[in-house]
Amino acid sequence: MRKQELRMGGEAGQSHGAGSPAEQVKALVDLLAGKGSQGSQAPQTPNRTPDTPLGPHGNDLRIQRHWDALLSRAGGGLGPGGPSPRLTNLLLVEGLTDLQLREHDFTQVEATRGGWHSTRTIALDRLFLPLSRVSIPPRISITIGVAGVGKTTLVREYIRLWARGQVGKDFSLVLPLTFRDLNTHEKLSADRLVRSVFPHAGESGVEVADLAKVLLILDGLDECKTPLDFSNTMACTDPKKEIQVDHLITNIIRGNLFPELSVWVTSRPSMAGQIPGGLVDRMTEIRGFNEEEIQECLEQMYPEDQVLLGWVLSQVQANRALYLMCTVPAFCQLAGSVLGHLCHHRRGPQDTELWPPRTLCELYSWYFRMAFGGEGQETGKASPRIEQLAHGGRKMVGTLGRLAFHGLVKKKYVFYEPDLKAFGVDLAVLQSALGSCFLQREEILASSAAYCFAHLSLQEFVAAAYYYSASKRAIFDLFTEGGMSWPRLGFLTHLRSAAQRAVQAEDGRLDVFLRFLAGLLSPRVNALLAGSLLALGEHQGSRIQVAELLQGCLRPDVAVSARAVNVLHCLHELQHTELARNVEEAMKNGDLAGLTGPQHRAALAYLLQVSDACAQEANLSLCLSQGVLQSLLPQLLYCQSLRLDANQFQDPVMELLGSVLSGKDCRIQRISLAENQISNKGAKALARSLLVNRSLTALDLRSNSIGPQGAKALADALKINRVLASLSLQSNRIRDDGARSMAEALAVNRTLSVLHLQKNTIGPMGTQRMADALKQNRSLKELMFSSNSIGDGGAKALAEALKVNQGLESLDLQSNSISDAGVAALMGALRANQTLLSLNLRENSISSEGAQDLARALCTNSTLKNLDLTANLLQDQGAQAIAVAVRENRTLTSLHLQWNFIQASAAKALGQALQFNRSLTSLDLQENAIGDEGACAVANALKTNTALTALYLQVASIGALGAQALGEALTVNRTLEILDLRGNAIGVAGAKALANALKVNSSLRRINLQENSLGMDGAICVANALSGNHGLQHINLQGNRIGESGARMISEAIKTNAPSCTVEM
């Protein structure tokens, strides 16, 4: 699996599910190593077309031979579907992040939750072309990707496509080399390097005139046996001079040799940092699978068994850790094979012996069992054959395991025959089915062979199994291959040594090794491998001691490192999860404030990565101190959404958060810092981070004290920032000066779409500046301006802007001292505006005169959907005018007229309008004394209206007659879903009428009868009526003097008649 892409062709799927488990494993490994049907096909010679790169050289036998050799090495292709879209569209990245440079591939996938930072892509056919008309083609290109994501497959596919003339048409020659090939040479000249891959070049090598049309591919930098050293390598310009291979590659990349040659390097991210960023012209990344591609991969493995496929998919989706790793194609293939094997052999859901893996170590243990063919695993079963298998397994661990372990320690992932002999690996073992399931042989250019484990993680698992076994008898430090002899102190001493080295390794290369080592101690893994690799019950008495040892590695450092988080992964593999569970429970209950120790901090950082609760939003409100936050900063980088409200954070904390948001690794998309103690200095620190941040789309600073200066700093950042889409500065005392600064930003910013400026003491002057900016701005969609003091002057300014602006969709002007004059101006604009969808004018001073202007606008406007006029002074005359408009309007969907001194006559007018209106879905008339007469008018409309879904009539002076009319309407109406009658006086008679309606009505979902003098009799009537109603989901009967006995009777009745309905009493 190492560096190999999952083949997406149909043959791959058909190979699984047949044959013994060992045969399945062998087929899987061959497939992922680029063998199988792909490798066995004779290369098909494509039709030569005039546009192939070989066209101009049709008579050149050297090129023809090279072309044939390339196709032979590349194999027959990925099948009729061609390469995956992941490989034909690479991610353009601007450089390596700290995470990629310093951490293990697994850690990179887990920390980023399988996501990708870059949204820019480049097509494979444009990989070596200029990005724009004024740029030049890249000379040095690097493509990075974690182990198993498909780097070598990408190279092979590019070669095939180039030979067919589909990509790289500017290149007359492509020279592909792997570092597995180069490792066989101690010294090499540039000319010999070219001839090694292009033996037909002749003595003169590649002509200098052609170098600009030659692409040199160097695949697998992470497998180079000697690290590249650009600081201390001597310059060499002589292409015939033999120098060390690493020096040769360094000089080619620097341009000292073949300066016109194009070079393409592939590597795992952590090793790509060997090449200085200043020498790299273009960096791309292969992304992993997304959710759809994981499903497609598994579907192609099991195309004919939908039941098995469904079970495997459900297991992957139910285990977050497993799902995240399945974004790596090679891992997805391995996990799918193991789970498919389990499903085939399970006797039923209660078969605990074959229960699905919950940890990585369990998954690889199942892989080991599959390699053994599944024989001899039943507890208590013994036979000569089983003993032979067990002995063979232990022997393999003793040879391949030692090779794997010392290769891991020395960062060596490719081995050659001298390496195998040095570690006592019998080549005959590699010919066996068991050996070939782990170590794969690959032919290289030097007429010899290279060996590597099928995937990096498999090398780590075998290494851990070796260390586990060897530590029982070793009397020396296994990491130093000898060194000073130790007293025979046993397994725990060696495990402590491994844990210390893993925690101290800055590059994390021993992280997964330590996880597997801890996992081998878990009871389930012991049961899985007992008899083949482990002794039954071995070291089980040491589990508690090992857990304590691992937790002892969590020191009170300033910051929680990735090594500390890995310790929690180890505890999970060990199935010792008390620490993580306790912290997770505290998170749910809001009790994190008391958990501040280093172990708790590490557990919290771990949960931020793996917890389902933190996947969408990490809510750390009301629980963090500055010290705890500071220790978590390295791990907060990778949270998508952070809620840090009400933590009493002050400006120094904003400096810390600013440093996080400024980091290249930062993936935070949304952050809420509401209700803290942030002043202008803290706002300035955040503003500085916005100048460079590329991920944050939403920033909430509600209820702080940033003032005008803080607003100015943020506004200046918005002039440059092109990512932030939502900003809330509610209750921050920014006043007119702050509004002026934000206006200046809006005049040039083209990405901000939501701006909240409520409760900021902004007056007419600040509003005028904002209005002027809106005349130029086209990106802002939502402006919250409520609870300021804009008055009629500010309203008129905004009205002028609305005549010009065609982008704003929602405008909130609640509580702004706007009277009829201001409304007249706004309504004049509304007749011309074609984009505004929502307008909030509640709690202003609009009278019946202003309502006339509102009505005229509603008669002509065809876009407004939501209008809120709550708590104004419309009275009957104004409401009647609006009713006339509602009768004609065809777009308004929500109308709020609460608390407007409306009485029965206006309610009648609205009832008549509803008989003709077909757009209004929500009408709010609460706290208006419409009485029974008004209720009857509205009820009469409900008999014919088919649009209204929500009707709010709280505290509307409605009695039994009004309720009876509404009940009668509900027997006919089939669209109303919400009816709120709280605070009326419908009594028992009204309750009975509504109860009769509920027996036949099927549309109502929620009904509120709170505080309606129903008494026990009325409430019981309603409860009993639910036996015929299967749609009601919620009913409120509070405040009706039901009594305890009545409550019990009602509860039983509802439980019997409508168990899915929620009742409040």
Image (cartoon, helix red, strand yellow):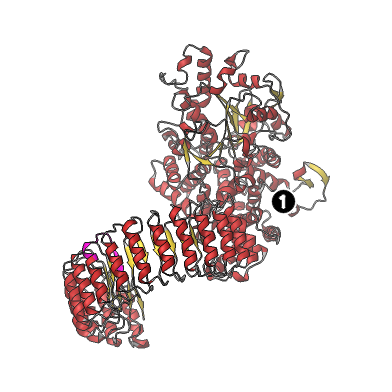
Q: Is residue 641 visible?
A: no
Q: In the displayed structure, does residue 56 sit left or right of residue 627? A: left
Say if 897 sits above or below 344 in the image.
below
> Which is nearer the eye, 528 or 899?
899
> Which is nearer the eye, 289 or 909?
909
Question: How many marks do you count on the picture?
Answer: 1
Looking at the rendering, in which quadrant would you find the C terminus? bottom left
Q: Is residue 864 magenta?
A: yes
Q: In the displayed structure, does residue 465 sit left or right of residue 352? A: right
Query: Which quadrant of the figure has residue 105?
Result: top right
Residue 124 lies, in percent from the top left, at 47, 33
Q: On the image, numbered disc 1 is attached to which residue?
A: 504
Q: Which residues are magenta?
A: 857-867
Residue at (77% x, 41% y) in the render: 481
Residue 199 lies, in percent from the top left, at 59, 17
Q: Is residue 450 magenta?
A: no
Q: Amino acid at mark 1?
A: Gln
Q: In the displayed structure, does residue 144 sit left or right of residue 961? A: right
